[in-house]
Image: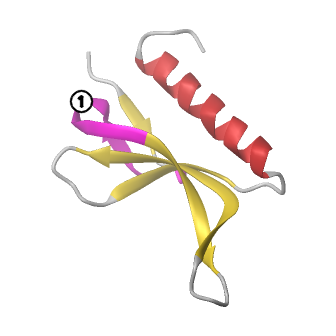
Amino acid sequence: MMKFIFDERGKLIINVEQVQAVYIHEDSDMDEHGNFVANGVFFVKCLLIGQEDSIHLMTFDGDDRDKNFSAAKAYLAELFDKLNGGNS
């Protein structure tokens, strides 16, 4: 049975058989010294087999870093549960 997921805009359909990795990425900004500093925004991304660019599945960008990370982990767990036949 084929399964699909959508990107966060609901415009791109991804066949899960083509997924190499799904992961959480924390965004960062550059400070005045040219160093990258985490900004507390998290993305759930998907990397397809044979592709170099990832696809955004969901963005978590509230005011609380810990809540954003927890929400990203919960989204990822729910996604895996659904793709593995769960009821969530």
Q: Is residue 49 left or right of residue 80?
A: left
Residue 52 spot, x, y in % from top left:
24, 59
- Look at mark 1 in the image and give the residue it sits on: 17
Q: From this view, report whether residue 35 is shown above or below residue 23.
A: below
Nearer to the camera, 87 or 59: 59
Q: Quadrant of the N terminus?
A: top left
Mark 1 is surrounded, within 10 Å at the Cα level, by few (under 14), some (14 to 19) or many (20 or more) other residues, namely: few
Give the residue drawn at x 33%, y 41%: 14
The quarter of the picture where residue 69 lies is top right
Give the residue drawn at x 32%, y 47%: 47
Residue 5 belongs to magenta span: no
Q: Is residue 79 left or right of residue 62?
A: left
Dot 1 falls on a residue whose secondary structure is helix
Looking at the rendered structure, the kind of residue marked 1 is Glu
Q: Residue furthest right?
A: 63
Give the residue drawn at x 73%, y 46%: 68
Residue 37 spot, x, y in % from top left:
64, 70
Nearer to the camera, 24 or 86: 24
Give the residue drawn at x 44%, y 10%: 85
Residue 57 spot, x, y in % from top left:
49, 47
Q: Is residue 33 visible?
A: yes
The quarter of the picture where residue 88 lies is top right
What's drawn in magenta, residue-wise? 8-22
